[in-house]
Image (cartoon, rainbow, N blue to C red):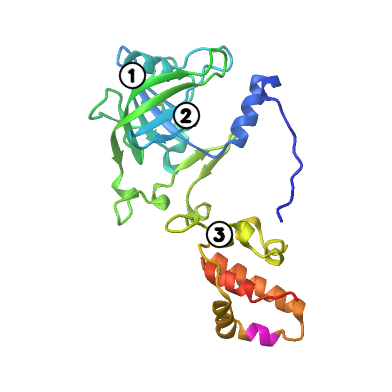
Amino acid sequence: MNPIRTTTTHDPSSLPIKDRYALLVGTVAPRPIALASTIDADGNRNLAPFSYFNVFSIDPPVLMVGPTLRGRDGGVKDTLANARINGEIVVNLVDHAMVEGASLSSSDYPADVDEFAKAGFTPVPCDTVAPFRVAEAPVAFECTITQIVSLGDGPGAGQMLVCQVQRVHIADDVLGPDGKPDAHAIDLAGRCGGNFYVRASGNALFEIPKPTGSGLAVGVDALPDHIRLHPALSANERARLGSAKVIPDETEVNEHKLIELSDIFMAHEDDPNALETELFSEAKGRLEQGDVDGAWMTLLAYNPG
């Protein structure tokens, strides 16, 4: 089964703010990046990236962005100040092609300095709100801020902006043939701890079939002990087996053994250890290909005696 890891335990309230920050953002990762566009009372444009960000509701459509009070002095960042003034924001998503500019916009420029210009981005007027969207962004959400929820008043305290989406602008080149966002094409960047980022594309993307639909998944506990406890299977492989809705019956297993596995059994009829190794290898290959039923039948054909 899964090895039990040794752990180091912290009481975050006992850590200095700097260490608490490093612990939290270095572990809760990767995080999506909101490149937040706002304007102040004088019409000055502001742009700043935030990774305390996600979608929190579909009906109504709501995103949440969490600027914190400044860690060094508890001061208010321009994004929060502007949100309090006019209650509008544009949340631009950050892809790999623009992540350096997004990082640059985090520089602590004075309020009247235009981060669009500093970061090399193109401002585009919005349909429903006064702040501008970023032309280079793959997706931009025009939002009204319905609430600002303060989680504290000291350095590092989160100030959650509840952003109701009014318009969504999505680049045509990140849409798949079905008209929905394509995970590979959108090529989003994510924030990790320290100076580290992640790129959500290529081999970093993988699919896991959802255990939904009619019927409940059988679960890992339905695996016979000689399979569930076998060291050849990883935790993910056991869970993939547990996602099956039905366990193959004896007739199905015997037919599978005769048609699909006869060569393996014949090759190792005098070597049970080699047979065991080969059957588990076969099952793992089937799981990698998404053939959960075939993996089940392969493993159930194995009888340790």
Q: Which residues are magenta?
A: 263-267
Q: How many marks?
A: 3
In the image, residue 299 lies in the stretch drawn in magenta: no
Q: Tag 1, which secondary structure?
A: loop
Name the residue at 29% across, 38% down.
169
Viewer-proximal residue among 194 and 279: 279
Residue 218 is marked as 3
Q: Quadrant of residue 257?
A: bottom right
Is 266 magenta? The answer is yes
Left or right of 183: which side holds 129? Answer: left
Amino acid type of the residue tagged 3 in the rendering:
Val
Asked if disc 2 and disc 3 are in contact, CB closer than 8 Å, the reply is no
Image check: 3 left or right of 155? Answer: right
Q: CA distance from mark 2 to mark 1?
A: 17 Å
Name the spot of residue 265 as percent of width and height, x first.
67, 84
Q: Position of residue 170 (x, y in %)?
A: 31, 42
Q: What's the residue at 41%, 50% (across, down)?
A: 183
Q: Is residue 252 above or below residue 18?
A: below
Q: Earlier in the sequence, mark 3 or mark 1?
A: 1
Residue 62 figure quarter: top left
At a point 41% along the width and 19% down the height, the residue shown is: 148
Q: Nearer the viewer, residue 238 or 19?
A: 238
Residue 295 in the figure: left or right of residue 200: right
Seen in the picture, residue 288 relative to 30 is either above or below; the reply is below
In front of the other: 199 or 254: 254
Mark 2 or mark 1, which has the lower sequence index?
Answer: 2
Q: Is residue 37 above or below residue 263?
A: above
The overriding secondary structure of the stretch rendered in magenta is: helix
Residue type beneath disc 1: Gly
